Image (tube, rainbow, N blue to C red):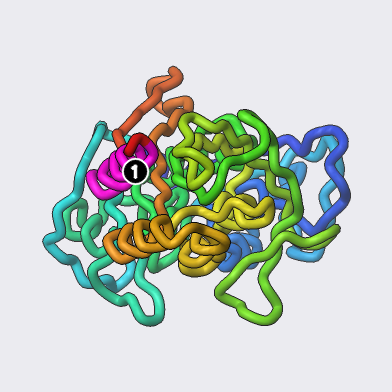
Amino acid sequence: MSDNPNPEIEILVPAGQESVRVDKYLAERLPDVSRSYIKILIQKNNILKENRPMKASEKIAPGDQIKVILEERPQPDILPEEIYLDIIHEDESLIVINKPAGMVVHPAVGNWSGTLVNALVHHYQNNLSTLSGESRPGIVHRLDKDTSGLMVVAKNDIVHAALSRQFADKTAGRIYKAVVWGIPEKITQTIESFISRNLRDRKKMTVNEGEGKWAVTHMTLVEHFGNLAGLCDFKLETGRTHQIRVHTASIGHPVFGDPTYGGRRRGLTGLSQERVVFCTKLLKDFPRQALHAFRLSFSHPVLKKEVTFEVDMPEDMKKLVEQLRQFQNS
């Protein structure tokens, strides 16, 4: 934390912002600050407008100056575990980590150990931010369990809040690589839709018309393997749950190997027997979605300069791509 025991964040509500409750607005403006923590701050009169405490139900308007007074919370009772971390960069303010596929980001029902947070608590003890809630110290944003790649972790609440605002404002850049089934019609395209929770299966998300959260994904075809599959880059403007996986499935090109959105069966439809045998073996050898967060850029909150980090695809994805190339050329 800063030397100031109660650091402050000042937010100017921009022109054009619709009138919504302040707790809802702050939860969207600082998407990785937990809603429960915002409510606690409101109850403690730590969220002010013109030096007047705001109520959770009070609505904001364009031009409002909102002050958020942070309070450091005690670290949660999380079991520290000596788990290897692939650290790409570290300084006094933050850590950039290459998360492996198969690792859950934070403890939750069914995954109370072996998570990235368990490893972080072991390596950094109490030197992590607290804004994301008791079970997520340091966590500014997340990756799905079976998605590999870059994540930034905050060491204090001021840095966390600054990074969180960049993700909310779309000034933090994230580019992913994925293998998708089939060949997209266009080399570059933008997929836009509302994404909401699937009412039939709460573990899944779905494209929705007019309901949920707006999501924008820019997709570029980098390499294709006949008409069987393609290697694509994805640039996110928003960071919705399962965004790339939901968007690619919605246009008929699910991520290869994705068990949730059709990526383990889409490619087996209408193929020759030779291709069915080949794809079946690929899927057996590759039990996850072929999705990797390979580039992350943001303005460093302390250094005040743009920083960019890249990490190559993991070995399993490299092998998958090479096998697709060889089959295409055979």
Label 1: which secondary element: helix
Image height of 39 relative to 31, above or below: below
In x, y percent, where is residue 120?
A: 24, 55
- At x 39%, y 54%, the residue is 147
Quarter-of-image position of residue 178: top left
- At x 17%, y 59%, the residue is 122
Q: Which residues fall within the magenta stretch?
A: 314-328
Q: Amino acid at mark 1?
A: Phe
Of 265 and 47, the residue lying toward us: 265
Residue 60 as seen in the image, left or right of residue 188? right
Q: Residue furthest top?
A: 305
Q: Residue furthest front?
A: 273
Of 175 and 252, the residue lying toward us: 252
In x, y percent, where is residue 250?
A: 68, 56
Of 80 and 236, the residue lying toward us: 236
Image height of 307 relative to 8, above or below: above
Quarter-of-image position of residue 188: top right
Q: Is residue 219 visible?
A: yes
Is residue 29 within the magenta segment?
Answer: no
**Which quadrant, please, contains the C terminus?**
top left
Is residue 324 within the magenta segment?
Answer: yes
Of 80 and 175, the residue lying toward us: 175
Query: Where is mark 1, residue-wise?
Result: 327
Residue 42 as seen in the image, left or right of residue 295? right
Q: Residues within 10 Å of mark 1 (few under 14, many from 20)?
A: few
